[in-house]
Amino acid sequence: MNLTLKFLFICLFSFSGVFAQENDSLFKEYILEKEINVNFNRIDLTKEETGFHKSSNLSSTEEILSRFSGVSFIRRGNYAPEPVIRGLNTNQIDVTINGMRVMSACTDKMDPVTSYVETQNLGAIDISKGSCHSEVVSNIGGKINLDMLTPQFSSHFLFNGKVFSGYRSTSGNYKGGLVVALSDENYALNINGGYNNSGDYKTGGGNEIENSGFEKYNFSLNGAYKLDEFNILRISGIWDDAYDIGYPALLMDVGSAKARIAGLDLESKDLFDFFNTLNFKVYFNTIDHVMDDSKRNNGFRMDMPGKTKTFGSSLTAGVLFDETTAVTAGFEFFNSLHSADMTMYFGNSNPMYMVTWPDVRKNQFSFKTSLRKYLSDKFSVEPFAGFAFVSSDIESELGFNSLQIFNPNVSKKSSRNIYSGGINLYYQLFDPLTLSLSSSYSERFPTVSEEFGFYLYNRLDNFDYIGNTAISNEKNIQFEFRADYNESDIAVGTSIFIYRFTDYILGKRMVSVGPMTPGSFGVKMYENFDNALLAGFEANLIFLFKTNFVFSAGISYSYGELANRDPLPLIPPLNGVLSIRFTKPDYMVQLEQILAAKQHRVNTDAGESISAGYGLMNIRGEYTFNDIVKINFGVENIFDKEYYNHLDWLKIPQSGRNFYGGIDLNF
């Protein structure tokens, strides 16, 4: 296994750079011709129903994301893992749906935003890694945007859809749903619903992991109305309910997790003969998340409900000044309310009540702008800058009084500013090869937990955490060298990156303070650490040969270190995915190998321990009988390997050998 990884590293890293340039709709045709044809940080699922990223309708959004180089997941159970980009978690990255901000409501991060979009309603995924991107303003680690399926207009009335279902053996997982589409030349509508039920799964060797099942309902709507030739009005909505979700790596499970998400967009082109593109968005969402341990035997009981409400709007405009110059600018505002509390029950004693998020209301405004300028046929520059302001208001009197115990100078009202900026340089060395060099400065606001949290238990290191209202913004300087080589039958991309953090935010032990959670080792308060370093590389390859064969490979590695030489916690090891696919008009077969090296650089203060490497083999296939019936099938973890990823909490093994199958009925 290690030899395979080393060989892949040598082959791919020798190209020394990454795919960098993204298609920009503002540029005219001759400029678009200079852009690369393959973007390893974006996937359009409407063009890849099943394949390298999505194996079947049973695939989750997280499973699709895990096929991107540099993307990993922190798993606390078999549902809703937390996305990580280059070792940076959701404290340091943004996750949006159709560009809408959605705030997680769980103090234990059991409800990442990715869990609210099902694959039958997922149109495209865009990933920005790091802050060398004009769209990344208020964080340091990057962004994942999940675009819902865009309804398409038609020249005449059309009504179509499909019914789908599938089953996985290792957990008795059943998933089914209905997708309906209606359209004509002026309107288009997609409606879909799905049901997903999973029992406790079995690991390699047949061991059952208790408290790992779940039940979920998801409904979504996407509509579009053509106001005229230049203006389109779009609506989107998600209704997502999940129940009885088990988290074997935590002390608590989830009784219910509910999301209500709605958005309205106005897209305009060539407005007033000045704006080439103009997009106005308004949205609203609520997240209700209820943790409980009623199915556990902990010796006590806890209820921990959390809730967020978010209202936001944004305006983005693009101007094409001439054939070589384009400017984009955008404003965003959102208001969010974050509430969470905990009630502990001890036998015949009186319950103990505590506010863990003190009804924090945040108002955030941000501005971003970028310029794209071609200085010659081969060389272009893209400077960008951003600014954000946030005000925070603590609305819970009880929560405010609790915070004063450890933050005596806390104020009910506070505000912060952050700044960001950088430049991308692009150079086409020769026709198939493009190089780019990027540099950026960015900051991020502390999260609600980092700033205002009160006795939040972390199962990984077994400490309670307390927020620090005096904590500084986390800051980062990033450098990245990227290159891409792209021809009709081969595309190769690699990147080398380095991040230099200051005021890095981590928990620091408070030796004189006792814990609240029974069995906890103690209490940590979030503090700023002087410096931290993150460096690494990613590489990708797609190769078409003998007409029907496609070979794909991706590899990534991150190295993290604090100023005292201790490793950054929860950094994934060297890992890669190799796939070979054979395709005919009516069927497809794909063989896949997933590899991960041993991770020996661990931060024991954060609860980490050394993780073993592993290798997995998967096979999948698809057969289309006719325009109506299509089946997909496969075997995951063919050799029934017992394994876990380094980021899996408590090293609970993942699924063993899994047989799956599904059917689509189109109409």
Image (cartoon, rainbow, N blue to C red):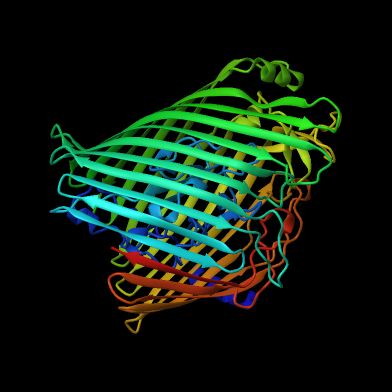
Quarter residue 104 falls in: top right
Residue 111 in the image: x percent, y percent?
57, 43
Residue 584 in the image: x percent, y percent?
33, 80
| Left or right of residue 320, residue 256 in this image | right
Q: Is residue 591 above or below residue 522?
A: below
Nearer to me, 222 or 193:
193
Task: Give the mark count.
Answer: 0
| Left or right of residue 443, residue 221 in this image | left
Q: Quadrant of the N terminus?
A: bottom right
State the residue at coordinates (28%, 63%).
Answer: 667
| Left or right of residue 102, residue 596 in this image | right
State the residue at coordinates (35%, 55%).
Answer: 179
Residue 451 in the image: x percent, y percent?
64, 28
State the residue at coordinates (78%, 50%).
Answer: 604
Quarter residue 595 falls in: bottom right
Judge whether residue 667 can be spotted in this image. Answer: yes
Q: Is residue 381 above or below residue 507?
A: below
Nearer to me, 511 or 83:
83
State the residue at coordinates (48%, 61%).
Answer: 59
Going by the picture, which residue comes out furthest to the bottom? Answer: 546
Residue 210 in the image: x percent, y percent?
72, 57
Judge whether residue 21 can be spotted in this image. Answer: no
Nearer to me, 567 or 59:
59
